[in-house]
Amino acid sequence: MTSEKKIYLSAKGITKTFGFGRQKTVAVDNVDLDLYEGEVVSIVGESGSGKTTLSKVLLGLINQTSGDVYFQGVKRDISTQAKKQEYWKNIQAIFQDPFSSYNIFNKIDSVLLDCINMRGGRYLPREKKIEMMTEACSFVNLKFEELTNKYPFELSGGQMQRLMIARIFLLKPKILLADEPTSMIDACSRATILDELMHLRKETGMTVIFITHDIGLAYYVSDSVYIMEKGRFVESGSADGVILTPHHPYTRRLINDVPKIYEEWDLSTV
Amino acid sequence: MKHTIQQVFRSGKFVLGFSIFSAILLIVIFYPMFVKDSPLAILGQGTFFPPGIYVNVYDSMSSTAYTLNLPDAAAKRVANKLSEEDRLSIKEWLVAAGIPESEIDTTDTAKLLGQWSANFDPKKSIPGMTNARRNYFIRLNTSLKGLLSTEGATISQTNPETNELEQVDTVNQKDYVNVGEVANTRILLLGTDNFGRDILTELVAATRVSLQIGFVAGLIATLIGLTLGLLAGYIGGLIDDIIMFVTNLFTVIPTFVLLILISFSIGQEQRGAFTIAVVIGLTSWVWTARAVRSQVISLRNRDHVNLSKLSGHSIVHIILNDILPYIASYVIMALILQISSGILAEAGLSILGLGPRTTEVPTLGLMMNWAMIYQAHILGNWWAYLPVLVTIALITFSMNLMNTGLDQVFNPALRD
Amino acid sequence: MAHTMLEVRELSTKYVTRFREDVYAVDRVSLKVEEGRSLGIAGESGCGKSTLALSLMGYYFPPLHYMNGEIVINGKNISGMKPDDVRKSILGKEIAYIPQAAMNALNPTRKIINFIEDVILEHEMYVTKKDIYDRAKKLFETLGLPAEVLQKYPVELSGGMKQRTVIAVSVLLLPKVLIADEPSSALDVTSQKMVIKMLKQLMEAGFISSMIFITHELPLLYNVVDDIMVMYAGQIVEKAPSHSAVFDPLHPYSKGLMGSIIVPEKGLRDVKLTAIPGVPPNLKNPPMGCRFAERCKFVRPECRVSSVSLREASDGRVYRCIIPEAELREAYAREEHKNDK
Ligand SMILES: Nc1ncnc2c1ncn2[C@@H]1O[C@H](COP(=O)(O)OP(=O)(O)O)[C@@H](O)[C@H]1O
Ligand SMILES: Nc1ncnc2c1ncn2[C@@H]1O[C@H](COP(=O)(O)OP(=O)(O)O)[C@@H](O)[C@H]1O
Ligand SMILES: [Mg+2]
Ligand SMILES: [Mg+2]
């Protein structure tokens, strides 16, 4: 099956180090990754395992120390501002902390207008733009009339992340990189956000890279899973395969340590 | 925005600083509307006239005289004239005449004079007294008699026809004029300086010029510091290295020494107030640049900047919209500090004689310089330097207060 | 009949903001924790869990203000006590509180042992530093923490280690009741598990008699506490034993919360998560009637008329809804049926 699908994004031997000499840390260590069209892939690992660093490399926000990223089969070239902007039409992101993801001086309208402009809608009539923004907001069950002229920080954390999804709805990228989008959100809003994210994926067929430290979330949303430990992938495969029959001890530990409700949660193993 | 301003005015420190500063500004703006003298006009012939009301003698002669029967008038007149030396001499005589020292009080003029007239005898010889000394006592006695006499003074004029003195008027000891009716009076609230200029008028003008120097210097320093800090912090790499190299150079050389050297090499004739301001600005941007750079470095990896990049914004847009607003409050505080340190730097330079050339405008520093050169502090002419010092202190104090007030609002860690 | 460690009757507290507005964050809350039992508090963020925890200690300082109600800790009625007396004789000794993000509030310039010295010297006068060190070392060893931690600075410790240190320090004076406010929310699963294990160990080894555990992670709560209390907009909406609270919730809000549980267990992928639409009401002026009415699927016109009081269900639990138990269960069954189709 997968062999018929197109590889959208692939990373070959990505390494990223910070600092020099004794302070040198290898955040991402020789990582390979293939992303097929329409797939939801999770990257799971503890904090500090290099997930965010890898995602920033994939996004082109920081340069890798070595290795290459291929986009639709061609080596990615983001050497100029124009090329970067072209690349970012295809790949977008949702970040971990909604409270620091927004410019606190910009109103919600301008966040959404930026997206319309980026999709070439700069010269659309104003009514059309409002219609598009209203549609995007209602997709994530927010009311645009209530949000207009407000600032993002006037919303709750959960609503801010949903606004992020509305943003993606307008941008319609081919690939979405969601870096722990629910880890700062309480459990109740988390379900809403995941549902809306999966709904959006179903509508647009976009490819999603879902980064999380909670293996339960990964199991819930993804088709395949990569387990990351100290900058390396230690296990990967289909979600069912990796999570129901884990092989690597690290994977087993991650699964063991998540609190369960149907099975016994074994506290003696730490 | 409105909310922030409200918050700022809730801070007591800011409000106090702001009130002092506005009061200074208002005086600087409105004073010249009422007093139209040129600040550098020389009014007095002589140096350091003390503060007070100056009444024209000639005009007071021709003003209406009112008779007031004030019993202590004579004693006051004498007290005003009798010098400390004379009082000690009187005491010396009285002691010699056998009055116990405990009964003599040189500060009680009326009693002293009573004892004198009761005991002075020009023929009496005191052992060890020279002739010259005796003559001095006789002269003293005469002049005291004159002072104590109740007769008035005669005003005479030469009659142009007869060429003789003719009495035109007499001035009685009990005559008073109403200051309001005298045609020419002048209040010199802070006296005059060494050149005979009205210090108050000069001080107001100097405050204005110094504030202007401070603003220009502060703006230049902040602009340079902000631009370099933004570039170094956001772009990083080689540009950062170069900028930091220059900044470090400036940090190693003490700014004030640099300031002195530049100021000296420009030469007295070329140094206008504006030039000095520019020179101060050009030498004091360093720490603004450093501080802005480190703020920008911590901002540039924030997610909202990343999101802005992903939204396809250009570097200029990101710097202006996603970085600058976040450091704006900080930059305003830096500007305030730069202005007040610009004012201090000018004062420092001028005291050393390296300030603006002296012929055009006064500055606070120049006024200090003049007072020092003419030794006002040694002569005890406090009005020549104390008001200047207080003004400098008030300006910097109010600006620093505003700064701490702003800090409390913008820095949540210090909020109560 | 077990000894009651903490009893709270009709406690209400409020915040007074800088703009002189009142935020009614805890509204007539009553609860009881018996010796040897633990109580969990669940609810969305902003529903007043942390405020309740703070209010429980009777230690009020602005912006938090006491309104009314009674707090009885281990037989002592502390309502109306002066804050200073509460701090001296109650805090740490009878009841200990680990605030949210406590581990990030440690003074970075002081070693852990200095921190412990402060705590002990606050309550006991005649102890030497050596005694304190020995005591701390013994406690740390009993709790499975390396004694070297004592000589380290907070920045040298990992998040999980810092949190466990904070917990160990909070039980130094052997309090009867421990309140832990989201002690593991910012941690990785492994550190979280160690923290939980330590809390359970504290209960078992008798360092503390009762525990109140606050989190919005229901699977965690289910594994740690005996009873679960669900809060919404400053009020209790349901209080039940853990198992029935998770597998058989009665209040529509609890039902919604339990529907958002995600665990990596077989079958999860086929479950449809039930999200609750909307946001909690503003506590500056809470709605007249049922506070949940705005977001409730089963809302009726009567719900908005007058405030709803707690009522008892057939199995002894309490919940705050005007709809009778049987009707609620019927409605849930219908929902499930619809989802299956
Ligand atoms: N800008 C940076 N400078 C130095 N070290 C960094 C930087 N960003 C991340 N690291 C280090 O890289 C490692 C991986 O971090 P990160 O990618 O954020 O992990 P995760 O997202 O999985 O929590 C960590 O050890 C972190 O300290
Ligand atoms: N210092 C404060 N001043 C005013 N209101 C506050 C303050 N702290 C919390 N609140 C309000 O009290 C309510 C309850 O907050 P909190 O107890 O922190 O909830 P939780 O712990 O459940 O997330 C919220 O509506 C919050 O906005
Ligand atoms: Mg991360
Ligand atoms: Mg809380």
Image (tube, rainbow, N blue to C red):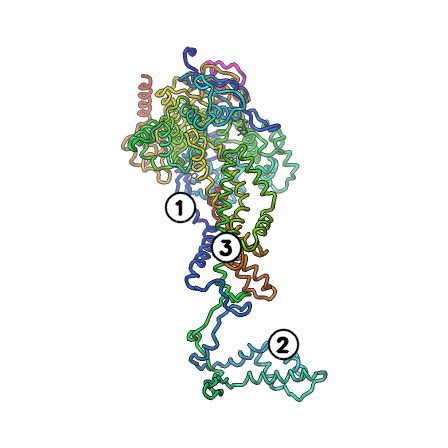
2 and 1 marks on the same chain:
no
* Amino acid on which the number 1 mark rests in the picture: Arg
Mark nearer the viewer, 2 or 1: 2
- Amino acid on which the number 3 mark rests in the picture: Ser
Q: Within 8 Å of ligand 2, the CB of disc 1?
A: no
Task: Point out the residue furthest to the right here.
Answer: B128
Instruction: Indicate the amino acid at tag 2.
Output: Glu
B122, above or below A239, in the image: below
Q: Residues within 10 Å of mark 3 (few under 14, many from 20)?
A: many
Does B45 lie within the magenta span? no
Which label belongs to residue B98? Answer: none
Is residue B279 shown to the viewer in this render?
yes
Position of the N terminus of chain B by quadrant = top left
Closer to us: A52 or A246:
A52
| Dot 2 crowding, Cα within 10 Å, few <14, some 14–19, many 20+ | few
- Mark 1 belongs to chain: C
Chief secondary structure of the magenta portion: helix
Marks 2 and 1, Cα distance to the nearest angstrom? 70 Å
Residue contact at pointers 2 and 3, CB within 8 angstroms: no
Q: Which residues are magenta?
A: A241-255
Q: CA distance from mark 1 to mark 3?
A: 43 Å
Instruction: Please state the horizontal and vertical placement of residue A152, each as a whole percent of the image.
Output: 39, 35
Image point 53% across, 68% down: which residue?
Answer: B50
The x, y position of residue C54, in whole percent, is 47, 38
For numbered disc 1, what is the local secondary structure?
loop
Q: Nearer the viewer's eye, disc 1 or disc 3?
A: 3
Chain for disc number 3: B
Q: Which mark is residue B210?
A: 3
Name of the residue lying farthest toward the left: C301
Dot 1 corresponds to which residue? C20
